[in-house]
Image: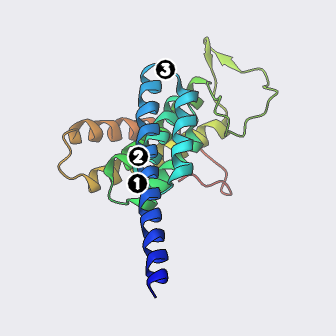
Amino acid sequence: MQKTLLIIGILVVTLFSTACVNKFAVQELNNNAKSLIAEGRLDDAIARLESSIDLDENVYETHYNLAVVYIQAKKYDKAIKSLEKVNELNPDFADAYYSMAVAYEDKAVDIIDGNVNDEDNNQDEDKQEVEQQDGKRVLTDTEKIQICDNLTTAIDFYNKYLSKNTNAADKDKVNEKIETLNKDLVTYSVDTPSDVKVR
């Protein structure tokens, strides 16, 4: 009986120690990542944060930090996936909704600017000649639909942010952003055939 209690005691201490070591290691990796971000070393910061998630995938802050770095690195689909995990772990964390809106908005802006270089984007490697009109790139209907889809989703997430953070200090700024994006939706909307749906 005493041996059994001793073994159970050792196991409990071991589990507790491991949890404490993992928590410390996760915090250390997150701190290292912040330093790397400040230095502009985004790929290294991503590697640190991914290692941190490997140690403990239930720390929503780590997923959030990783998403923010992914957005800076223009890896929007990966950022969105990380933010979905944040929402799963902590659905009341308002900043995740704001960052999700930023990811979708930036995705739309990159299409508008012709800077679609996200590794997750399904763009052809062989780019055809871009049509120009008055020195500006002409967007295809497919691009306009993608832009509108991303802008609509961004608006939805800005609204979710405001609903989660009713006393947001930046409420007026976010409402102005939503108004601007709604105007952009009109600018980039396209008359589509009935079998193509735009949200």
- What amino acid type is highlighted by mark number 2? Phe
Q: Secondary structure at mark 1?
A: helix
The amino acid type found where label 1 is placed reads Cys
Marks 3 and 2: which is nearer the front? 2
The one of 89 and 12 positioned closer to us in this rendering: 12
Residue in the foreground of this view, choosing between 47 and 123: 47
Q: Which residue is mark 3?
A: 40
Q: Position of residue 52 (x, y in %)?
A: 51, 45
Number of the label disc, if any, that sits on residue 118? none
Q: Position of residue 76 (x, y in %)?
A: 56, 39
Please tell me whether mark 2 sits on a helix, a strand or a loop.
helix
Query: Would residue 145 be found to the left or right of residue 92 on screen?
Result: right
Q: Earlier in the sequence, mark 1 or mark 3?
A: 1
Depicted 161 relative to depicted 144: above or below: below
Q: Is residue 79 visible?
A: no
Q: Residue at x 43, y 53 (%)?
A: 59
Outermost residue, front direction? 2
Circle number at residue 24: 2
Q: Position of residue 179 (x, y in %)?
A: 33, 39
